[in-house]
Image (cartoon, grey):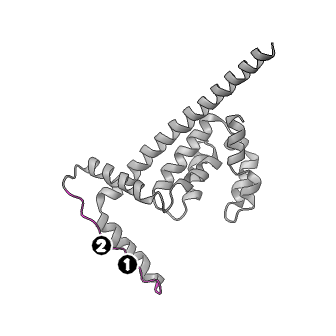
Amino acid sequence: MTASRLARRLLPSPETLEQTKGLKWLGHYLRERPWLWVAHRRRVALGAALGLAVGVIPLPTQMLLAAAVAILCRANVAAAIAATWLTNPLTLVPIWGLAIFLGRQVLGVHGPISAPTELALNWSDPASWWPALSQWLSELGAPLLVGLPCAGVVLGLSLYVIVYVGWWAVIRYERRRRLRERALRA
């Protein structure tokens, strides 16, 4: 299976996006602009990198923001949306650990890391969630706030290289395989 076929199979189609609540406008927009949808090595790699970079920053509208950034940068929108899914509760701890490390390096903070108090949410009072979360985040401090964009850039660039080189390797493998098959037939 070629890399572009694999990408087309893994990435959602404009029709799928038109059926997804909140993303209907995107499917219609992409249908009229196929260059934002084409499974091309550079565009998919850039879309994935932008999606992961946006997805690292904890926002409630990561997919919409990733789609908007991908449209602005003329990257593959489906790859950008899919890459935001790489940030989830399972990957939160390593990503935030990297962010705190990078933030401490940028700010020149040395010494032991002080752990924040436990995040205690009163589940019966949703109005108290934001102040409790804000307090908990402020205890993590400036290293996290500085480190999250840095981690987004580092992880985005890394994913760009991984997708680009991986796609290139698959194409090269497929070409060699086809050449061997032709040589065997001849």
Question: Few, some or many C-alpha atoms within 10 Å of disc 1 (few <14, some 14-19, many ≥20)?
Answer: few
Q: Nearer the viewer, residue 46 or 182?
A: 182
User: Whole-percent x and y of residue 99?
Assistant: 36, 53
Residue 100 position within the rendered picture, expressed as x and y whole percent measured from the top left: 33, 55
Residue 45: percent from left, percent from top = 57, 39
Residue stretch rendered in magenta on the structure:
112-125
Numbered circle sitting on residue 117: 2
- Which quadrant, please, contains the N terminus? top right
Q: Amino acid at mark 2?
A: Thr
Q: Is 100 in the magenta?
A: no
Q: Circles 2 and 1: CB distance less than 8 Å? A: yes
Element at label 2: loop
The reply to whether residue 38 is in sight is no
Q: Residues within 10 Å of mark 2 (few under 14, many from 20)?
A: few
Q: Is 113 inside the magenta-drawn segment?
A: yes
Residue 52 showing in the rendered view: yes
Query: How far separated are the C-alphas under marks 2 and 1?
Result: 9 Å
In the rendered image, the residue lying farthest to the top is: 186
Is 181 left or right of 128, judged from the image as shown?
right
Q: Mark 1 highlights which residue?
A: 120
